[in-house]
Amino acid sequence: SAVISQKPSRDICQRGTSLTIQCQVDSQVTMMFWYRQQPGQSLTLIATANQGSEATYESGFVIDKFPISRPNLTFSTLTVSNMSPEDSSIYLCSVEGPMVDTQYFGPGTRLTVL
Amino acid sequence: AQTVTQSQPEMSVQEAETVTLSCTYDTSESDYYLFWYKQPPSRQMILVIRQEAYKQQNATENRFSVNFQKAAKSFSLKISDSQLGDAAMYFCAYRSAQDDKIIFGKGTRLHILP
């Protein structure tokens, strides 16, 4: 499977600030996905990011709060804007492939907002 | 809408024994994929096993196998010869063949007793 890295692996931030999370893949992929995992919870899809087009957001997630960039086929960023303690979560990126219709995940970014 | 239900929040098994994790799902579609992911304390989501709904044969990966009952919409995971490294959160997940979105269950935390 593709090797996926995320930066930072963890961070502690003050409320009202923003954090940008990077996701890098070692091969070109068409689709990248961003998930949120709140403490003790399952994963929830934030948005799907295709290169060259606007990200598609799931219900409950808006671009102003979670802007996403996808400048090329190996890289994406997710920004968590104007953070509050409720944004404290693990944020994971995933990509599809090499197995068809199967997603593989990065190591995640643990965000704590004080 | 599709849903995934894992009715066992936690389970324990003695090392070297066999354990089965339950998962049921609800869908009106006939073509889909089912997955089991493992999330150890490192928080990385690791694909354990994948099943295509049109295949009657149950998927197997070394010590991991599934019991896929399409009519009953059941997809349980059997772990044989449990090892300490199997301790993790296990998520059952569903993906329609028509969509990119993966729907996760709430997870089952598996403890391995030495």
Image (spheres, coloured by chain):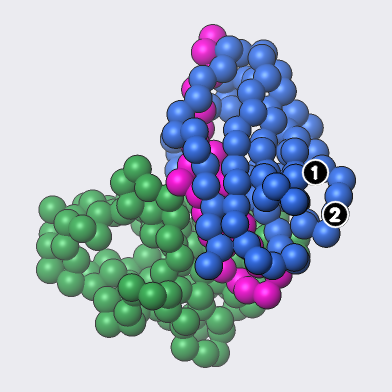
Task: Answer left or right for B17 relative to A64.
Answer: right
Label 2 amino acid? Lys
Q: Residue A13 at what x, y percent from top left? A: 18, 57
Q: Which mark is residue A29?
A: none
Which amino acid, by three-letter code, is at mark 1?
Ala
- Could you tell me which residue is drawn at 82 percent across and 43 percent down? B58
Residue at image mark 1: B59
Q: Nearer the viewer, residue B85 or A20?
A: B85
Q: Position of residue A76 (x, y in %)?
A: 48, 73
Q: Identify the residue at horizontal 33%, vertical 73% (top origin).
A: A60
**Within-10-Å neighbours for mark 2: few <14, some 14–19, many 20+:** few
Q: Quadrant of the C terminus of chain B?
A: top right
Whether B68 is among the magenta residues is: no
Name the main secondary structure of what is drawn in magenta: strand
> Residue, x 45% and y 65% (percent of image)?
A45
* Bounds of the magenta segment: B88-114
Q: Nearer the viewer, mark 2 or mark 1?
A: 2
B91 in the magenta segment: yes
Figure disc tally: 2
Question: x, y (%) of residue A114?
Answer: 13, 53
Is residue A34 toward the left or the right of residue B28 in the image? left
Q: Marks 1 and 2: in contact by CB < 8 Å?
A: yes
| Display colour for chain A | green
Which chain hosts label 1?
B
Give the alpha-carbon distance from disc 2 to disc 1, as whole Å: 9 Å
Q: Chain of mark 2?
A: B
Chain letter, colour blue in render: B
Quadrant in which residue A113 is drawn: bottom left
Q: What residue lies at 78% left-to-right and 32% top-to-bottom?
A: B62
In the picture of the structure, the residue carrying the numbered disc 2 is B55
